[in-house]
Structure formats: C-alpha cells, structure tokens
Image: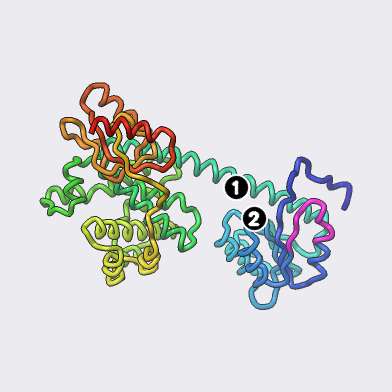
Amino acid sequence: MNPSVPPAEGKVEKPRVLFVDDEPLVLEGLRRSLYREFDTDLASSPEEGLEKFEKCGPYPVIVSDMRMPGMDGAELLSRVRAMSPDCIRVMLTGYADMEAAMRAVNEGRIFRFLNKPVTPDQMILTLRACVVQYHLVRSEKELLENTLAGAVRVLSEVLSLANPVAFNKGFRIQQYVKHIAAKLGFSDLWQYEMAALLSEMGCVTLTPDLLEAIHAGQRLSPEDQERYGQHARVGHDLLARIPRLEPVAEMILRQSESRGSLLRNPTPGAEAVTNGARMLKVGLAFDHLLSSGSSKAEAISELTNNPGEYEPRFVAALTDFQPARQATELRVIEVRDLRTGMVLSEDLRSVQGVLLAAKGQEVTYALVKTVRNFAEKGTLKGTIRVTVGIGEPWIAKAAARGAQQS
C-alpha cells in the first residue's frame, strides 16, 4: 500500500465491500491490496453477486465490472439498487463506452465510474468516499424517519383524543398495510405505515356519532355521505404541509381510487405513492368487511373476486395475516389506573356518555393525561375492562382495586 494514502483512522470494524468481476485475477488482486482496511467479499459472476447480496448482505458498498457474460454490470447494479437503495454502487470498465456508462448511471444510480486499470490507491480513496457517503445516507434517513415518526406519534395521539373511532380504525389499517408491505419486500416501510395510521386523519372534522354510524355499517344520509367522502382530501391538505410527508399525504388522498384509475393515472415518478394508495384501499375494504361480520376468508374471497378494484397481490398477502399478539390477560381496573400500552376491551365513556376512546384502542400517554383530568373533575369514574401484558408488577394491585369497586 502506498504510504501516500494513509489508512483511515478510528475504524473499529472494517467496512464490507462486495466485488463482482468475471476475472479471478482481478478479484484476487483487489483482495490483496485492500484487506488491511476493508472486509472484501468476491463474486465471479453477476448471478453469484446477487446470491451473496441476498444471503450475506446488505453491503455498504458494491463494486462491479461492466462487461460480463450474460447480465452486465448496469443491470446488476440496478437490481442491487432495488434490493438495497442505501448501498453505494461503483462501476468498473475497461472500455471507453459512453453509452454503457450513461446506462449504468441512469439505471444503477452509481456513485463512481472508474476506468480500468485502477491503482490500489485510487480504489482505496474511492472506497473511503463510498463509506462516508453510505454513513451520510443512513444518518440522514434515520434522522428523517425518527423525526417524522415522532411527529406522526403526536398527530395520532391528538387524533385518538379528538376522534377515538377514527384513530382505532387507522391503527387497524396500519397492521394490515404493514403486513402487506413487509411480505412483498417493499423498502421504506415507514411511509406506508404512516399513511395507514393517518388514513383517517381527515375525520377530525367529523362528529363521533357519524363515525360510529359508519363503523357500524349504518346507512348514511346523502349529506353525511358527502361529509365523509371529503375526509381523504382534508387529511391530505393537513399532512401535505409537513416537509417530506408529501408522498404520505398523496397516498391518503388517493386511497379511495379504483385500482384501474391508479393504473391509468399514476403519480409521475412516484411508484411508492401508487402502491401505498392501493394498499390503503385493500386495507380499508378488508377492515370494513371484518367490521361488518365477515370472516377473514370471506373478506379475502370478496376482494379477490373484484380485481378491478383491489390489487390481487395485496389481497393475497393478507391470507396469512394475524393481529400482533403477546401473552395477555383480561383485567378489570379502575379508570384511574389506565397505563400506556393497555388495550381497551370496551368503550371508555364519561359519566355523561361522551366517547373518550373506543374498544380495541391502545392506551396512549395523551389518553392517560385526559383520563386523569376527567377523573379529577368527577366526570369519569368506575372500572373498565382492559387487556394487559402478563407479569407486569402493578397489575395485581390495580386489578384488586378494580375488583373492590365492581
């Protein structure tokens, strides 16, 4: 190694790099020149490279030759980009082929393009830049997701207080969409989960009795149907004001469009928005059928028989859906003992009958504070049935007080 290229400092663990080239001598030369600073993995064909990426990845960096038998480097890096968008991609070529270079840049979104032969010093400096870029991308992504996730948690808790029925429905839709997206291998799951959780955000403008009627499947007057029909637009307009949530807002806006309409009129350059809207549509219809008394098998059968409205692969993904469960037990406790994480087994209402939280809703911090304020004023009292995790130390005491009050 040339002393003019000092080793990077402060590296506790060597960065992993996958090299793909059909020339074994090139691969071995790279391994020998880079082993001090990088943990190298080698593949002698694009197919082997994809297999290693699936089994041993993700890799922070992949370096591929352009000209290889069968699949070329441009197609390989394009596939890697679909599998792991954060992976930093580098192309090697021994040809002055501008057309190939342009295709590699456009399809694979490569970070660097290097002409052979590449000296060890050139490769080391390039890989260091790749590793820095990888950490920048990951840090920005984590900051974005964590910041937005915090904002969405606040919004959802506000929605849970303003309209418990809408919040509870959004929580169920989130479970369906999360299952579909994870099973089909979509990246950036956070945006689909956020769109699902906030899909009923626009319902803050509706009265609780109207939402209860909708949830119960009651026939609505034309005026009420029109009011409810505007909730997707209202939710979109509220969320579109938050930077980086524009795609989520667009998913919510288009949640009621037919599959055919989404196929004919895709949002330009935003496949994720179209997929998100289709998943919301399937999740909403699935939830409506379950809430109306259909079994899961009946609901899936009905959606499957209407492929013009509902994406078949999203419907099929729900076949093995099961609500998240843990070891729980049903308890009767005083309302003042409600804690975050509990799940209500019945509606929580004030003395005057005002719905504060719907059956099936998970207790949030905001709801706990609301309950305490109502209890202090004497407008909320008595006991309530909740589902709680088994083994939490304060449960027995809370349950005992609830039993005394029953």
Residues packed near mark 2 inside 10 Å, few (<14), some (14 to 19) or many (20 plus): many
Disc 1 marks a residue whose amino acid type is Val
**Picture layout, residue 141 above or below residue 283:** above
Q: What residue would you read off at disc 1?
A: 137
Could you tell me if residue 250 is visible in this image?
no
Q: Position of residue 265 (x, y in %)?
A: 35, 63
Disc 1, disc 2: CB below 8 Å?
A: yes
Q: Is residue 207 left or right of residue 114?
A: left
Q: Earlier in the sequence, mark 1 or mark 2?
A: 2
Could you tell me if residue 208 is visible in this image?
yes
Question: Which corner quadrant of the image does residue 372 belong to?
Answer: top left
Residue shown at the point (57%, 56%) measured from the top left: 85
**Picture layout, residue 258 above or below residue 244:** below
**Picture layout, residue 63 above or below residue 388:** below
Question: Which corner quadrant of the image does residue 317 belong to?
Answer: bottom left
Q: Residue furthest bottom?
A: 70
